[in-house]
Image (spheres, rainbow, N blue to C red):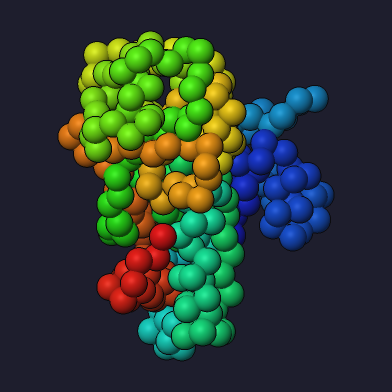
Amino acid sequence: MEIRLLRYVMAVAEYRSFTQAARHLHIAQPSLSQQIAQLEHTLGMRLFVRGPGPVTLTADGRYFIQKAAPIVQLHEDMARALHERQMGMGTELVIGSPAITGGHLLPPVLSEYRARFPRVHVQWVEEVPETLENLLVHGTIDLAVLALPLQTNHLVTRPILTEPILAVLPAHLAAWMDTALQRIVAGGPEHFPLSQLTTAPFVLLKAGYGFRGTVLSLCAQSGFKPHTVYETSNIEVAQALVAQGHGVTLAPAMVRQASSPRLVYRRLTGDPTRTLVFAYRADRYLSRTATAFMDVMDSLATSEPVA
């Protein structure tokens, strides 16, 4: 059975459409349908349920995909490894990151990487952490910048940096502030317990954003569930809402707006941190382009702070 046919079946299963799969595979839709129908005839089983809606896998189709996926993966890894063995470093790299984290961390690394390896085309994919882990699992991207802990077990990591998590408070007095919190804002203790914010309104990131889970976990460890007044997909927007007195939030030091007169940043008792890592598949061939990118990050981190 040809690898090509395995890829065809996997594409139809992924897109749930012969038309979209054919477009992705750059072949004519009638040809794709005919070849899969011939494969089904040869196997003596139906792989797909065809109807007016999306194409779905049969039980036999799901078993076929389960067996085909590692074969296709092994073939792709071998081809990539042999190509790099013969020709040297490849010319493609796909890296993913959350938008804000990537925006703060990656631009200087990309500049240095392009200066060292001008032949490599780098594609940068911006997505939420949950989606990035799925893209890694499916081999769509080579590397992802993510915060620990990861949700997917068979990813391996290489550390980038560890940074403090800070409380972000409005600089001006708000009606909801109690006396103790007013003293902290006015220049109170360098560190204060997160439990001091038990009754404060919180601005949180939406579900699916990894840092939201970090904030909820820290609040739970301090014995409370935050009273959420706003949710956003952007930590910069969260800080803007805090600046207007709508509540408080927590933020990694990387995104601190030090020049804003409307925001006050305070460290928390216990100095909680978050760790950013490169993540990649443990069971996939890691290209030289990907390894070189991580090496460039390391070289910049040892010479000067990246963030």
Quarter of the view holding residue 224: top left
Residue 65 horizontal side relative to residue 267, left or right: right
What residue do we see at 33% from left, 54% from top? Answer: 277
What residue do we see at 48% from left, 63% from top? Answer: 106
Quarter of the view holding residue 177: top left
Q: Position of residue 133 (x, y in %)?
A: 43, 44
Pick the front one: 162 or 90: 162
Quarter of the image containing the C terminus?
A: bottom left
Q: Is residue 125 above or below residue 263?
A: below
Q: Position of residue 169 (x, y in %)?
A: 43, 30
Q: Is residue 99 above or below residue 62?
A: below
Q: Position of residue 299 (x, y in %)?
A: 32, 76
Pick the front one: 254 or 54: 254
Q: Position of residue 155 (x, y in %)?
A: 32, 49
Quarter of the view holding residue 143: bottom left
What residue do we see at 38% from left, 84% from top? Answer: 85
What residue do we see at 23% from left, 21% from top? Answer: 221
Q: Is residue 270 above or below residue 9?
A: above
Pick the front one: 247 or 91: 247
Residue 140 horizontal side relative to residue 51, left or right: left
